[in-house]
């Protein structure tokens, strides 16, 4: 029987302590691949904890791909092939999770605080507001983002590595200009078509990698010519798939095999994991400095705030400055200073927590409404614990178009899953995306 010691006076929840200890034992090989873990009830009794504490720890391990649940048999350790990849020290800080909906954007946006900070900046810092910012953005905002990434995503990035842009599309443009069309890019299939459209607009060859239940298809990736892969491992859109830890190490192994290979990690809605801890970013376990991390405030604050950022590996920072340093930062200096204070003074964290609470209620209300409608009978929901949408796989003879029409008539906000495939599917796959 597995036995652990815990710090019961620590601010870190007990389920997080259990999760970390089991995870470390699996990574170190103390718990072998395929080894059965104790049942929740037995484990709880042995440790003197509640069953729900063990369940929360197991759920987090399942979400990250360290263990699997086999119906009527129990929980088993997965195979973790780290090869030559090392894991960076884990200093994760648990966050309290809660959230807000797109239709409520105007009501949920912190106008009063935002306006107060902006008035103060306009009144007392007029000179710096009119000064031309560095091409990467003002130092204050880059420093604030650096601190946020460290506390929330366990990402150690200096402010100099952070580049501010007017939306992720602007940052994609800079990446295209940096690498040029001699590189072959690869994106996820299905996926957000605009990403591929932007790359193709710069005459860059773009491959499409199928997404499996645990992340991108590595066999497919190894069989094509690709230099840079653009993926969203913490929460794929639209499938909701979370890339398993084993698959993450395989991706890092792939990128290590050539000096010209890089990964673009799109962490577009990582703030909105509604159950358990945040999924570790690929950047935080990359020891080779080959991951370009990207995120945006358009999801977490408002779609009209076109402020995004990327964290560049130190290995390409110099060439980026030499080749593109003449570009001006495309984000208003007024907004940059306001956002810098909004983050550094703790308002952003409070806003995110409030938004999570709201979105969780939206999700729970959505599921309650689904229970009341016959059309959802025998359907299977997936991807509901991360991000702002889930997938529903229907048991029906209706076409996807007929299915969408019926759920829309019932007042649900949904979209066809099949329209996000680059190779457009003409047949029905009976999957719809529901938004919170």
Image: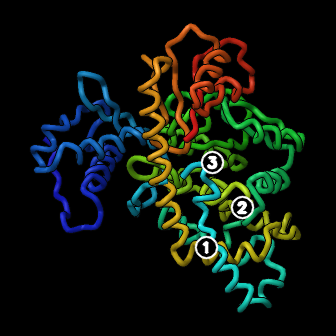
Percent coordinates x, y for residue 172 in the rendering: 78, 51
Q: Which residue is mark 2?
A: 305
Q: Residue at x 85, y 64 (%)?
A: 324
Q: Which residue is mark 1?
A: 112
The answer to whether any part of residue 94 appears in the image is: yes
Relative horizontal placement of residue 336, taking residue 63 as reference (left or right): right
Q: Quadrant of the C terminus?
A: top right
Mark 3–mark 2 distance (CA, rounded to whole Å): 16 Å
Relative horizontal placement of residue 204, taking residue 357 as reference (left or right): right
> Which numbered disc flags the more N-terminal residue, 3 or 2?
3
Determine whether 126 is above or below 355 in the image.
below
Q: Secondary structure at mark 3?
A: helix
Q: Secondary structure at mark 1?
A: helix
Q: Would you identify the image quadrant in which residue 65 lies?
A: top left
Q: Residue at x 44, y 46 (%)?
A: 361
Percent coordinates x, y for residue 221 in the rendering: 65, 31
Q: Residue at x 63, y 42 (%)?
A: 231
Q: Nearer the viewer, residue 217 or 170?
A: 170
> Which numbered disc flags the more N-terminal residue, 1 or 3?
3
Q: Which mark is residue 295?
A: none
Determine whether 233 is above or below 215 in the image.
below
Q: Which mark is residue 103?
A: 3
């Amino acid at each position: 029987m597995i036995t652990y010691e815990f710090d019961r006076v620590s601010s870190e929840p007990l389920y997080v302590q259990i999760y970390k200890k089991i995870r470390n034992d699996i990574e170190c090989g103390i718990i072998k691949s395929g080894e059965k873990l104790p049942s929740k009830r037995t484990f709880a009794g042995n440790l003197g904890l509640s069953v729900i504490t063990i369940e929360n720890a197991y759920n987090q391990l399942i979400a990250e791909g360290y263990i699997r649940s086999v119906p009527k048999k129990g929980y088993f350790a997965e195979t973790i092939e780290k090869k030559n990849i090392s894991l960076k020290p884990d200093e994760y800080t648990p966050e309290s999770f809660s959230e807000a909906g797109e239709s409520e954007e105007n009501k949920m946006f912190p106008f009063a605080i935002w306006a107060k900070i902006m008035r103060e900046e306009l009144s007392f810092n007029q000179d710096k507001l009119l000064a031309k910012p560095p091409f990467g953005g003002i130092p204050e905002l880059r420093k604030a983002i650096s601190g946020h990434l460290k506390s929330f995503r366990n990402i150690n990035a200096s402010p100099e590595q952070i580049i501010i842009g007017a939306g992720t599309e602007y940052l994609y443009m800079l990446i295209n200009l940096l690498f040029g069309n001699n590189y072959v890019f690869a994106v996820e299939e299905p996926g957000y078509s605009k990403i591929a459209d932007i790359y193709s607009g710069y005459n860059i060859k773009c491959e499409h990698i199928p997404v499996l239940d645990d992340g991108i298809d590595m066999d497919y990736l190894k069989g094509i010519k690709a230099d840079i892969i653009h993926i969203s491992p913490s929460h794929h859109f639209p499938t909701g798939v979370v890339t398993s830890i084993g698959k993450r190490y395989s991706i890092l192994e792939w990128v290590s095999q050539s000096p010209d290979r890089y990964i673009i990690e799109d962490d577009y809605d990582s703030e909105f994991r509604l159950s358990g801890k945040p999924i570790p970013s690929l950047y935080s376990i990359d020891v080779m400095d080959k991951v370009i991390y990207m995120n945006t405030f358009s999801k977490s604050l408002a779609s009209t705030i076109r402020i995004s950022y990327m964290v560049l590996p130190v290995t390409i920072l110099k060439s980026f400055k030499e080749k593109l340093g003449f570009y001006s930062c495309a984000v208003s200096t007024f907004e940059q200073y306001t956002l810098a204070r909004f983050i550094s003074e703790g308002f952003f964290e409070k806003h995110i927590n409030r938004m999570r609470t709201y979105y969780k209620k939206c999700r729970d209300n959505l599921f309650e409404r689904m229970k009341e409608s016959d059309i959802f009978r025998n359907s299977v929901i997936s991807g509901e614990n991360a991000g702002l949408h889930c997938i529903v796989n229907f048991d029906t003879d209706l076409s996807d178009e007929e299915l969408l029409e019926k759920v829309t008539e019932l007042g649900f906000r949904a979209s066809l899953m099949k329209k996000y495939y680059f190779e457009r599917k003409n047949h029905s796959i009976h999957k719809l995306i529901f938004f919170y």
